[in-house]
Image: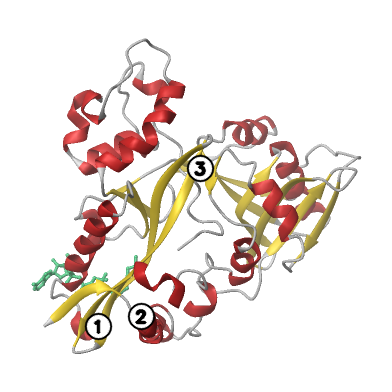
């Protein structure tokens, strides 16, 4: 009989063997899952790694990393989910679906409101997970793009983790982000979790003001020679764009691609006024599932309260328009989806969608 439960720390090796086989070696790649996810698929996080076990053998896995989103200063308890797989010999028997339901139930009981999932496949969409967010994809090309120069700013490009302290100081000032400790920053930077197939190291460009204060950074890698993809940026938005311009003109890149969440109106306006236009989509490769409406409401009601302009605040999720709260998928779309969003009228359109931290940066799972 197949048993569904959180993993034991001593099962990490078996989990790594399974996820490396499914996501790496079966398609001819190096078994890098342990190296790329050192704070996720590890003994310390075993209690959040859910497994299906048949006669002592791990046959399916769903990994969870509990995270806190910080949205305009308000803490929101959430989780990220990834490395979802069933051993090929056990696929198509309902094991993935059963484990998924076990995970959703557990997360709701543990005080979490929603889970952000790396993946958009049928297994998720059949189970009330929806695409969320809105992002604009910009491509800056050498020859077509030239930004203003800031004489007083210095910058430094490296492949190491030496500047992790400065990056941490810049990231913690972001208005929408994950809670990320100073100790985690260099570990995640070194692990390169979001790049598949993996690359040896990420490139980090940091800008400094006089007196060495960090102003902004961009982190990314070359998808092919001369084509740089930004996976995470933070700090002053004009300086973020200036750094991308430096990659084009000092570092000999031919193009720089960046995806900007729609809530980041400042960066969008800097890029648009420099003559660019972005192409919009959902947050790429991501779905979201609400696991507990009560936990979610507890965490997001202060954000709504702060943004609310009218006298009568919604007192619960049931006060939202069109009975969206009756259905997890509709509720998630109402709260978090910007792309192809229908109008819900005022005051709703002023407050929603709520911003979500970028899922494809260093906290990628
Ligand atoms: C995606 C994955 C985890 C699904 O796991 P699984 O255990 O096979 O999932 P299930 O058995 O619950 O569902 C798979 C299919 O079997 C069907 N099924 C469910 N219960 C069944 C049962 N009792 N008998 C027969 N078929 C069943 C489902 O309808 C589903 O069909 P569909 O997805 O083709 O429409 C697995 O295919 C996998 O490991 N894929 C490779 C890794 C991957 O892509 N992971 C996701 C990263 S985003």
Report if the beta carbon of the residue with label 2 is closer than 8 angstroms to ligand 1: yes
Question: In the image, residue 87 lies at what x, y percent?
Answer: 26, 82
Residue with the most extreme top position? 311
Instruction: Give the quadrant of the N terminus.
Output: bottom left
Residue 66 versus residue 251: which sits nearer the camera?
A: 66
Identify the disc placed on residue 22: 2
Which of label 2 and label 3 is nearer to you?
A: 3
Question: Mark 3: which secondary structure?
Answer: strand
Relative vertical location of residue 343 with respect to residue 5 in this rendering, above or below:
above
- Where does the image place residue 356, in percent across and percent down from the top left? 45, 42
Q: Secondary structure at mark 2?
A: helix
Residue labelled with disc 3:
70
Would you place residue 153 above or below residue 221 in this image?
above
| Quadrant of the image containing the C terminus | bottom left
Say the numbered circle drawn on residue 210. none
Residues under numbered marks 2 and 1 in contact, where contact means CB atoms less than 8 Å apart: yes
Q: Is residue 61 above or below residue 256?
A: below
């Amino acid at each position: 009989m197949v048993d569904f439960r959180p993993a034991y720390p001593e099962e990490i090796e078996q989990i790594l063997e399974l996820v490396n086989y499914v996501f790496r070696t079966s398609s001819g790649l190096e078994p890098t899952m342990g190296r790329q996810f050192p704070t996720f698929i590890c003994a310390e996080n075993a209690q959040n790694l859910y497994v299906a076990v048949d006669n002592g053998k791990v046959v399916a896995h769903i990994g969870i990393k509990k995270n806190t989103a910080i949205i305009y200063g308000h803490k929101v308890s959430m989780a990220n989910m990834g490395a979802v797989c069933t051993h090929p010999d056990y696929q198509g028997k309902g094991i993935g679906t059963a484990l998924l339901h076990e995970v959703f139930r557990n997360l709701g009981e543990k005080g979490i409101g929603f889970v952000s999932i790396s993946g958009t496949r049928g297994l998720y969409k059949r189970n009330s997970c929806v695409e969320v967010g809105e992002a604009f994809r910009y491509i800056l090309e050498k020859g077509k793009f030239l930004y203003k120069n800031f004489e007083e700013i210095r910058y430094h490009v490296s492949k190491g983790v030496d500047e992790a302290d400065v990056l941490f100081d810049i990231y913690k000032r972001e208005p929408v982000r994950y809670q990320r400790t100073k100790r985690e920053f260099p570990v995640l930077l070194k692990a390169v979790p979001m790049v598949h197939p993996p690359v040896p190291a990420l490139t980090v460009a940091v800008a400094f003001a006089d007196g060495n204060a960090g102003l902004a950074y961009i982190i990314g890698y070359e998808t092919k020679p001369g084509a740089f993809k930004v996976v995470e940026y933070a700090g002053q938005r004009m300086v973020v764009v200036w750094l991308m311009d430096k990659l084009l003109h000092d570092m000999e890149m031919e193009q720089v691609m960046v995806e900007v969440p729609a809530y980041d109106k400042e960066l969008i306006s800097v890029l648009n006024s420099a003559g660019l236009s972005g192409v919009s989509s959902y947050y790429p490769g991501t779905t979201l599932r609400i696991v507990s409406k009560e936990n979610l409401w507890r965490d997001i009601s202060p954000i709504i309260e702060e943004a609310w302009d009218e006298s009568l605040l919604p007192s619960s999720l049931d006060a939202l328009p069109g009975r969206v709260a009756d259905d997890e998928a509709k509720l998630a779309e109402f709260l978090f989806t910007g792309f192809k969003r229908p109008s819900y009228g005022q005051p709703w359109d002023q407050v929603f969608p709520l911003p979500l931290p970028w899922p494809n940066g260093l906290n990628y799972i």
